[in-house]
Image (spheres, rainbow, N blue to C red):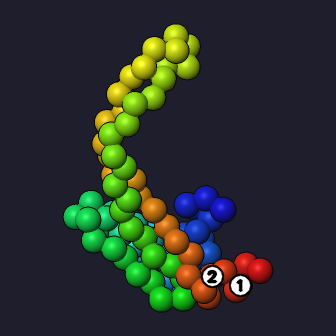
Amino acid sequence: MNKNDLISAVADSSGLSKSDSANAVEGVFDAITKALSKGDEVRLVGFGTFSVARRKASTGRNPRTGEPMTIKASNQPKFKAGKGLKDSVN
């Protein structure tokens, strides 16, 4: 399922027009993105939790030359599925 399929599914299940559904889906994505960029966590009970994992700086190797290189510290978005989502998939 891609983004357009998701928008169509939301429109079908909610009775909204596709443009209203697109705005709703974009709004959800924007809200999650803004919360994560501030370092907050987004908990959707029964679905899952979006959070930010902080990765420390490390030393890696260039695969072509084998030379050591430093990998900068970064923030990575993370998703942990909730019990309701896990149960519905299994």
Looking at the image, the residue that sits furthest to the left is: 38
Residue pictured at 62% horizontal, 65% vertical:
5
Q: Position of residue 66 (x, y in %)?
A: 52, 15
Quadrant location, the C terminus? bottom right
Q: Relative to the observer, which residue lies in front, 55 or 16?
A: 55
Residue pictured at 28% horizontal, 71% vertical:
40
At label 2, the amino acid type is Leu
At label 1, the amino acid type is Ser
Quadrant location, the N terminus? bottom right
Q: Relative to the observer, which residue lies in front, 9 or 34?
A: 34
Q: Which residue in the structure is indicated by mark 1? A: 88
Q: Residues within 10 Å of mark 2 (few under 14, many from 20)?
A: some
Q: How far apart are marks 1 and 2 (CA)?
A: 5 Å
Residue pictured at 60% horizontal, 86% vertical:
83
Is any part of residue 23 visible from this angle?
no
Q: Position of residue 76 (x, y in %)?
A: 39, 53
Looking at the image, the residue that sits furthest to the right is: 90
- Total number of numbered discs in the rendering: 2
Q: Where is residue 73 in the image (x, y as percent from the top left)?
A: 31, 42
Q: Position of residue 24 (x, y in %)?
A: 41, 75
Residue pictured at 33% horizontal, 74% vertical:
41
Q: CB atoms at circles 1 and 2 under 8 Å apart?
A: yes
Q: Which residue in the structure is indicated by mark 2? A: 85
Is any part of residue 58 visible from this angle?
yes
- Helix or strand or loop: what does disc 1 sit on? helix
Q: How crowded is mark 1: few (under 14 residues within 10 Å), some or many (20 or more)?
A: few
Q: From what the image shows, is residue 38 above or below residue 90?
A: above
Q: From what the image shows, is residue 37 above or below residue 27?
A: above
